[in-house]
Image (tube, rainbow, N blue to C red):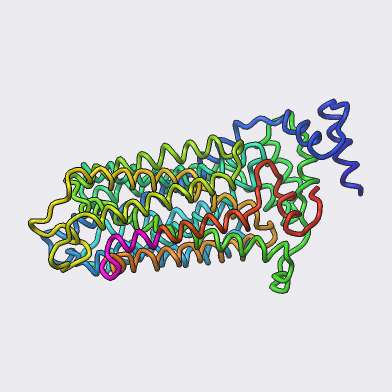
């Protein structure tokens, strides 16, 4: 069967386009018939996963200060235990990435997303019922496991259900809901103790499991399993009754499977390397270390109400991530990554200057007590610099290096290798997150606060160089066209 002839025939019949010459006119004719309401609904249900993931990331920031002072000696955290409480979630997430890679291939995207709600709920339940510190650790590992699965499955689910006109916007909603979850838990932490906070954190994953029962599997996964009729039904649901979905099925139909020997194929190893490096560079900006220990950073910067300052930072992140989602399909991925990298490089350099200029205490008994020793006061005319630097960093991260690596990962990896490659990308992200968050306090101690932020600034400079020379622009391209770029052929 001649696929190109079938495409033109379907579009001429269904859309009445008098000149469907070339792919773009075919796409425009097809997309003019598409209705996005059901697609938006499916995306809304799926991003309850990233919201749960954001609750997990943000939970440690308000909980750690309370747990280090709690009256119960069996639950009280010392500095080392507090560090593990914040960072051990990334160990679970790395394992979750590996598990998620297996799940998406064996049981599909939808069921994987539903099942990942269970460790979210079980993990927070264990934290709520904790009688000792080890129960905290088990709960954090389980919620981390769920976060790892979610961080792989949801971007794939959205990229495989969305069409190219809205894929950037909808893909950016993953990070938008992560930062919304972080802001929500920071805000709730101002009014709730750590147990009630954990109870609230278990609500989004419960809603995720229920709502996904009514959402479809992705058409690309169904086609990869030879279920064309089911895929057409799903596409009709997602695109509306007037869309000629047979054309889209013909465009995305996939018949091959993945073998390790395929890693020699540039169409596979190039996007895999790009995906891994994006995640490594994302974590090397220091974002997770900064968010995990946001309150402590502001305490070191001498802000009296560090909890409120953290809420303000999270709100800035939500606003700029929303802006990124709105302009993603117009501005493009590459330019936003460069702008983001420049903003983070400048802000981390400035933050380092702030910590360099303020008076130093005679000793630093603990990284968490750094710059808060008795009698040490900041220059009154410099306190604004810390908050401004943090705000610029968070807004810069939110507009580029926050949402875009996950979006590009879901766009560039070919469907037949998404389980294996997706797992590798997620593991690299969470492995680096563990290294950075676990060593953050040690860096603050050995390199000083100024040296640590200057190190992050150098990493941001490397991000910019990597983006300019190695990242392809994926704006407005179908997943099949993107795959063809790496193969060095023309897309369908």
- Asked if residue 84 can be seen in this view, the reply is no
Tell me where residue 457 appears, x and y as whole percent: 41, 57
Q: Residue furthest left?
A: 375
Determine if the magenta segment contains residue 270. Answer: no
In the displayed structure image, the side of residue 446 where residue 282 appears, left or right: right
Tell me where residue 403 appears, x and y as whole percent: 50, 48
Quadrant housing residue 90: bottom left
Q: Residue at x 23, y 55 (%)?
A: 357
Please identify the dominant SS of the magenta region. Answer: helix
Tell me where residue 419 appears, x and y as whole percent: 61, 62
Above/below status of 263 relative to 311: below
In the displayed structure image, the side of residue 97 where residue 246 appears, left or right: right
In the displayed structure image, the side of residue 91 where residue 82 appears, left or right: left
Question: In the depicted view, which residue is nearer to us: 419 or 388?
Answer: 388
Tell me where residue 209 appears, x and y as whole percent: 47, 48
Count of marks overlaid on the render: 0
Question: In the depicted view, which residue is nearer to us: 169 or 138?
Answer: 169
Q: Which residues are magenta?
A: 445-456
Q: Residue at x 56, y 66 (%)?
A: 424
- Asked if residue 285 can be seen in this view, the reply is yes
Quadrant housing residue 180: top left
């Amino acid at each position: 069967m001649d696929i190109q002839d079938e495409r033109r025939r379907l579009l001429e019949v269904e859309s009445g386009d008098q000149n469907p010459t070339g792919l773009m006119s075919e796409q425009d004719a097809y997309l003019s018939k598409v209705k996005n309401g059901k697609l938006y609904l499916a995306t809304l249900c799926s991003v309850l996963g990233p919201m749960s993931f954001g609750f997990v990331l943000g939970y440690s920031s308000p909980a750690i200060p309370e747990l280090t002072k709690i009256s119960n000696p069996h639950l009280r955290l010392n500095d080392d235990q507090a560090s593990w409480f914040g960072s051990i979630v990334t160990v679970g997430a790395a394992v979750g990435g590996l598990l998620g890679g297996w799940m998406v291939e064996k049981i599909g995207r939808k069921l994987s997303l539903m099942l990942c709600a269970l460790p979210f709920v079980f993990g927070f339940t264990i934290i709520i019922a904790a009688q000792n510190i080890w129960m905290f650790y088990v709960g954090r590992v389980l919620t981390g496991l769920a976060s790892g699965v979610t961080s792989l499955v949801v971007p794939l689910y959205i990229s495989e259900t969305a069409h190219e006109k809205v894929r950037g916007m909808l893909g950016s909603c993953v990070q938008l809901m992560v930062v919304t979850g972080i802001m929500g838990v920071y805000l709730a932490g101002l009014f709730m103790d750590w147990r009630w906070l954990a109870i609230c954190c278990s609500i989004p994953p419960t809603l995720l499991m229920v709502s996904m029962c009514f959402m479809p599997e992705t058409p690309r996964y169904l086609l990869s399993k030879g279920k064309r009729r089911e895929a057409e039904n799903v596409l009709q649901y997602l695109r509306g009754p007037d869309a000629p979905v047979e054309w889209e099925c013909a465009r995305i139909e996939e018949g091959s499977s993945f073998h390790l020997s395929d890693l020699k194929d540039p169409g596979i190893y190039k996007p895999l390397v790009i995906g891994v490096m994006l995640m490594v560079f994302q974590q090397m900006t220091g974002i997770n270390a900064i968010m995990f220990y946001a309150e402590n950073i502001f305490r070191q910067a001498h802000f009296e109400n560090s909890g409120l300052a953290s809420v303000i930072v999270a709100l800035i992140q939500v606003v700029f991530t929303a802006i990124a989602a709105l302009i993603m399909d117009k501005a493009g991925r590459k330019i936003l990554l460069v702008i983001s990298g420049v903003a983070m490089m400048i802000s981390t350099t400035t933050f380092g200057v702030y910590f360099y200029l303020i008076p130093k205490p005679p000793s630093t008994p603990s990284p968490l007590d750094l710059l808060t020793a008795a009698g040490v006061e900041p220059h009154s005319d410099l306190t604004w610099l810390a908050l401004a630097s943090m705000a610029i960093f968070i807004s810069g991260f939110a507009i580029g290096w926050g949402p875009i690596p996950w979006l590009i990962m879901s766009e560039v990896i070919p469907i037949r290798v998404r389980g294996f490659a997706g797992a590798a990308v997620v593991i690299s992200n969470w492995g680096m997150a563990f290294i950075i968050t676990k060593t953050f306090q040690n860096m603050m101690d050995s390199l000083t606060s100024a040296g640590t932020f200057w190190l992050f600034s150098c990493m941001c400079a490397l991000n910019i160089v990597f983006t300019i020379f190695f990242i392809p622009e994926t704006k407005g391209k179908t997943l099949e066209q993107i795959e063809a770029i790496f193969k060095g052929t023309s897309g369908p």
